[in-house]
Every structure is written in structure tokens, then in C-alpha cells.
Image (cartoon, grey):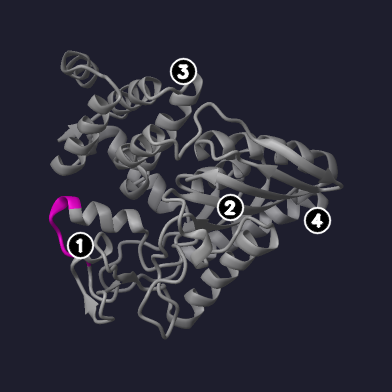
């Protein structure tokens, strides 16, 4: 089924309001999820609604929470997310961090104990649009591990996103590298399962440690495992994310004692930098324009129309989906409808919202 972004956002907002969120909080969560769909990341889009609602109903997300500054000194901030919705917590956290970076030229932000932060690229985009470079390391605890280490075949940590954002110039838009350190995000496995599709080769191990294309292996007991991207190099980056976001800032690592909460708890170490504090910002922008133009000028290989830089795929997807709408597969849509009814929305309310 094809939906407009506006319709999906209104529906999601109504669901979160019915689940106990304030109007402002519900709007923030809904916008973030639908923006993920628009930018081509259905793994972090409206399909997250069912799991969010289920967790709220059993007290595994605290509604209407705010980021709490625990400690600060110089450029360093320590912030507790109070297990609130990550879409709100991260937004508030980076508001505080950006203000710190404006004052000091840099901010180092230790955010711990937030519920799922959503698409990390959204927070890189926020920093870039404010004129700052940012680097984000994320880990997750609270659930069984999903990703096998290089050389292993069973999960030992989560998909541990890594993100770097760079502000745009007068000649080009922002650059945002946002990626899971597994070959694909766990949400993409969920999307494939809901569509009744197999995943590509080299993405999954089954519980016995053999390669498989069956997404069901990630939803049973015993569980399979995702494969890290890039062999030992991607695994190394994922392990560093685990250490920096989990151990260094005291958020907790994905060891057995931190796997029992039955919810997603994200920790994020963010470094925000003011280009004006590190050199001549005009030189930075000129060099950025030159290297980007030079990279994109490379002769294309077979099967490629043009060379892209990080952030381009999301821009292209958004242009297309704003025009053509957002496709939601039937299984995912049915799950969203069940979630809406579980928080008291009546069938006529749902019909009115999705028809708007």
C-alpha cells in the first residue's frame, strides 16, 4: 500500500498520543520515523511503531521523559536519557551539545540510558544543518546480541551504528555517513521477513553457524546472527563502537548481565566540532567542494550511473518518495493497525486517520 508522508505521520502521532505521549512528544517520534521512510530507511521507519507500543504498554519505555544533564565541565557533557523515547532524548541532547560547541568550539557528549535512538543519521543531519561536524558512536544493550564478531558465528553485540556528518557549502548539500556496522541493520531483516523475501548471501548465520538467506533465523530461539560488514575491518569498527559508547561512557556493554531488560537501550558518544575552531572555515569549505567534485568526476563502472557521496542516496530516495509516496508492505501495515488498536484507537478513528 502507498501512503503519503503526511498521512503516515498523522497516524503514527495519534498512536503515540493514545499510548500516553504528549502531543509534542508524539509528533517528534512520528516525524523521525516517517523521515526514515522518506530517506529510504524503512528499517527505522513506521515499522518500528508496533515494538515501541508493545514496550510502552509493559513499561519498557518511559513516556514524556527529557534529557537530564548529570555532569558537565569544559566541553564535556554527561546526559541520562531516563529510558525515554530516543527521538526526543537525542534531539534535546544535541540541542545542549550544540550550544556547548558554540561556546567552546567543541562538545563531547556522553548520552546513556536512552530508548532506541532511531536513525542516527537524523542526529548527524541536525548537527550538519547547524554548521557543525559531528561523529557518533552507538551501542545497544537490553536485548540478546544480534551480530557475530569476525571469525565467530553467534551474536556478541548489536548493529552498533557509526555516523559522521559534515555541513554543506554554498555549492553542495551536507555529507552524512550513517551506517550499521553489520552488513545490514536488523530492521532490514525484519522488513524482508514481513515482505516474505529472502536476504542476500553473506548477511546471516543460522543458529548452527551456517550461512542462510532466511530472515526467520533472527526471530526464533535459538537465534541466528548478522554478519559484520567489511570482514575484520567492519568488525573492528563495531567493537570500537561497543567500547566507546558502552564502556567509556558507562552506558553498559552487551555482556550477558545487560541482555535481560527486554528493550533496546542505546548509548551514544558524540563529538561535535566547530569548523571555525579548527582552522580557516573558508579553506575547509573550498577543500570540501574540490574533493567532492573530484571524487564524483570518476569514470563510472558497469552498472553505475554516477558516483555518489554519503548522503546522496538519502536525498535521492527522499525526492522520489515525496513524489511517489511511501510503500508499506501488508504485513508491516497490519502490525501497525494491531498496535493502534492495542492503545484504544477504534476502527472508525483509524479509517479516518489513514484516509486523511
Label 3: how many residues lie within 10 Å, few (<14), some (14-19) or many (20+)? some
Residue, far right: 74
Name the foreground residue: 157 vs 322: 157
Of callouts 3 and 4, which one flags the residue occurring earlier in the amino acid sequence? 3
Q: Of the numbered discs in the image, which one, if any, rests on residue 201? A: none
Q: Between marks 3 and 2, how big is the CA–CA gap? A: 26 Å
Label 4: how many residues lie within 10 Å, few (<14), some (14-19) or many (20+)? few
Of callouts 3 and 2, which one flags the residue occurring earlier in the amino acid sequence? 3
Q: Of the numbered discs in the image, which one, if any, rests on residue 278? A: 4
In the rendered image, which residue does mark 3 sit on?
Answer: 23
Element type at mark 3: helix
Of callouts 3 and 1, which one flags the residue occurring earlier in the amino acid sequence? 3
**Labels 3 and 2 touching (C-beta < 8 A):** no
319 sits left or right of 31 in the view: left
Which quadrant would residue 130 be assigned to in this image?
top right
Q: Nearer the viewer, mark 2 or mark 4?
A: 2
Q: Between marks 2 and 4, how big is the CA–CA gap? A: 27 Å
Q: Can the viewer see residue 20 in this picture?
A: yes
**Labels 1 and 4 touching (C-beta < 8 A):** no
Vertical placement of residue 215 versus 113, above or below: below
Element type at mark 4: loop
Report the magenta stretch's main SS.
Answer: loop
In the rendered image, which residue does mark 2 sit on?
Answer: 267
Of callouts 2 and 1, which one flags the residue occurring earlier in the amino acid sequence? 1
Name the foreground residue: 195 vs 166: 195
Q: Nearer the viewer, mark 3 or mark 4?
A: 3
Q: Quadrant of the N terminus?
A: top left
Give the x, y percent position of residue 40: 33, 47
In the rendered image, which residue does mark 1 sit on?
Answer: 216
Amino acid at each position: 500500500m502507498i501512503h503519503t508522508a503526511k498521512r503516515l505521520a498523522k497516524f503514527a502521532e495519534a498512536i503515540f498520543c493514545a499510548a500516553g505521549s504528549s502531543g509534542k512528544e508524539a509528533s517528534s517520534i512520528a516525524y523521525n520515523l516517517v523521515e526514515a521512510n522518506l530517506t529510504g530507511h524503512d528499517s527505522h521507519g513506521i515499522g518500528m511503531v508496533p515494538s515501541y507500543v508493545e514496550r510502552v504498554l509493559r513499561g519498557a519505555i518511559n513516556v514524556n521523559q527529557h534529557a537530564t544533564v548529570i555532569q558537565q565541565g569544559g566541553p564535556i557533557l554527561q546526559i541520562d536519557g531516563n529510558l525515554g523515547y530516543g527521538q526526543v532524548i537525542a534531539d534535546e541532547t544535541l540541542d545542549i551539545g550544540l550550544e556547548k560547541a558554540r561556546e567552546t568550539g567543541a562538545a563531547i557528549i556522553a548520552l546513556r540510558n536512552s530508548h532506541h535512538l532511531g536513525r542516527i543519521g537524523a542526529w548527524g543531519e541536525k548537527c550538519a544543518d547547524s554548521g557543525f561536524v559531528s561523529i557518533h558512536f552507538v551501542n545497544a544493550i537490553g536485548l540478546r546480541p544480534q551480530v557475530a564478531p569476525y571469525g565467530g558465528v553467534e551474536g556478541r553485540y548489536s548493529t552498533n551504528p557509526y555516523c559522521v556528518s559534515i555541513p554543506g557549502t554554498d555549492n553542495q548539500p551536507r555529507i552524512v555517513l550513517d551506517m550499521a556496522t553489520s552488513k545490514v541493520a536488523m530492521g532490514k531483516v525484519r522488513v524482508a521477513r514481513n515482505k516474505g523475501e529472502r536476504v542476500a548471501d553473506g548477511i546471516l548465520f543460522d543458529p548452527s553457524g551456517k550461512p542462510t538467506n532466511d530472515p526467520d533465523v533472527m526471530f526464533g530461539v535459538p537465534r541466528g546472527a548478522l554478519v559484520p560488514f567489511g570482514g575484520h575491518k567492519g568488525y573492528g569498527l563495531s567493537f570500537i563502537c561497543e567500547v566507546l559508547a558502552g564502556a567509556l561512557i558507562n552506558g553498559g556493554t552487551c555482556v550477558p548481565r545487560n541482555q535481560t531488560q527486554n528493550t533496546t537501550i542505546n548509548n551514544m558518544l558524540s563529538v561535535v566540532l566547530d569548523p571555525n575552531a579548527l582552522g580557516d572555515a573558508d579553506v575547509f569549505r573550498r577543500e570540501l567542494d574540490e574533493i567532492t567534485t573530484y571524487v564524483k568526476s570518476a569514470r563510472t563502472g558497469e552498472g553505475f550511473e554516477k558516483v555518489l557521496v554519503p548522503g546522496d542516496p538519502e536525498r535521492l530516495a527522499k525526492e522520489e518518495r515525496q513524489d511517489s509516496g511511501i510503500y508499506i508492505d501488508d504485513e508491516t501495515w497490519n502490525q501497525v493497525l494491531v498496535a493502534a488498536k492495542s492503545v484504544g484507537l477504534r476502527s472508525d478513528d483509524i479509517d479516518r486517520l489513514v484516509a486523511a
